[in-house]
Amino acid sequence: MGVLNVTPDSFYDGGRWEEPGAAVEHGCRMVDEGASIVDVGGESTRPHAAPVDDEEELRRVVPVVRGLSRQLAGRARVCVDTRKRAVAQAALDAGASVLNDVSAALWDVAAQHGAGWLAMHMKGEPEDMMSLAAYDDVVVEVCNYLRERAEAAEAGGVREIWLDPGIGFAKTAAHNLEILRRLDELVTLPWPVAIGLSRKRFTGVVTSGSEELPAPLGERFEASLAGAVWAMCKGAALVRVHDVKATVEAAKLVGAPRAGGVGAMSGDRR
């Protein structure tokens, strides 16, 4: 899943793809690099981010979703990343086929549209979530929360469900690493798991070795790629990334031993 933020304030690519034509072009480029899904977001959910009203988020998102849906028809899927009901409905009407739901509360919208639904774990709101980063056992609590949401969505008619433990959302670096270490516990649930850790602050903390002075954004690529590979090896079915080409190439190597080698993957058995 390629990340496409059409916002001025997202932590990594904010301001780069605000113009709809440039955003559509970048989304198509990510598919050329191997992305299966392009995830369009019009509101930053980074820690302490200010909320955006419905009208502004609709203005940012809908033209890009519509343009990508036309350009990518038959090649890749378009996803909308939102926690607003009106934006989810409009984006699905405009051609998105997956709803990336940070609130894990909009499953009924996905059901109405026959869309895929990706439920994420988070406590509180972006403005205050880091003050809520306290758990007796973060993995158990995340698993229980996502299981309950998925079961409700399934009962409500959603046929495609993905689970995202919410790396970086109301979680410290230690919590994020514990989730990755015990990811096999999450993937035992009966729904595929998505992991989004690309360029996030905790990758900079691991790289620098300092909670107070994480490595800057430009120095988090290697840790992000390593995290994506770790997640794939532990059973994640989807990784959400900014650096599509490198991650796709890494995924090929992760998949090759499982497929029985290069010939098995390419269809060449010689």
Image (cartoon, helix red, strand yellow):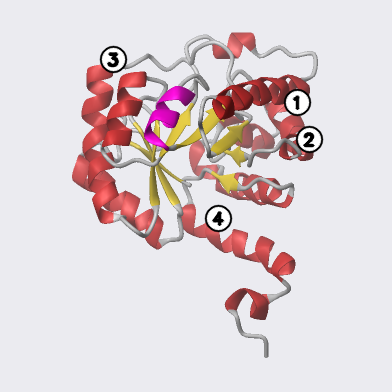
Q: Earlier in the sequence, mark 2 or mark 1?
A: 1
Identify the element where label 2 is drawn.
helix
- The residue to which callout 3 is attached is 53
- The residue to which callout 2 is attached is 185
Identify the element where label 3 is drawn.
loop
Q: Residue at x 21, y 38 (%)?
A: 63
Q: CA distance from mark 4 to mark 3?
A: 33 Å
Circles 2 and 1: CB atoms closer than 8 Å: yes
The amino acid sitting under disc 4 is: Thr
Residue 247 position, x and y percent, is 55, 55
Q: Is residue 18 shown left or right of residue 104?
A: left
| Range of magenta residues | 107-114
- The residue to which callout 4 is attached is 247
Circles 3 and 1: CB atoms closer than 8 Å: no
Q: Earlier in the sequence, mark 1 or mark 4?
A: 1
Task: Point out which mark residue 139 bears.
Answer: 1
Q: Quadrant of residue 258?
A: bottom right
Foreground mark, 2 or 3, reads 2
Q: Residue at x 50, y 45 (%)?
A: 241
The amino acid sitting under disc 1 is: Val
Residue 165 part of the magenta-drawn span: no
Q: Please say if 201 is above or below 268.
A: above
Q: Nearer the viewer, residue 31 or 77?
A: 77
Q: Earlier in the sequence, mark 4 or mark 3?
A: 3
Circles 4 and 3: CB atoms closer than 8 Å: no
Q: Is residue 189 shown left or right of residue 31?
A: right
Q: CA distance from mark 2 to mark 3?
A: 37 Å
- Mark 3 neighbour class, 10 Å CA radius: few under 14, some 14 to 19, many 20 or more: few
The amino acid sitting under disc 3 is: Asp
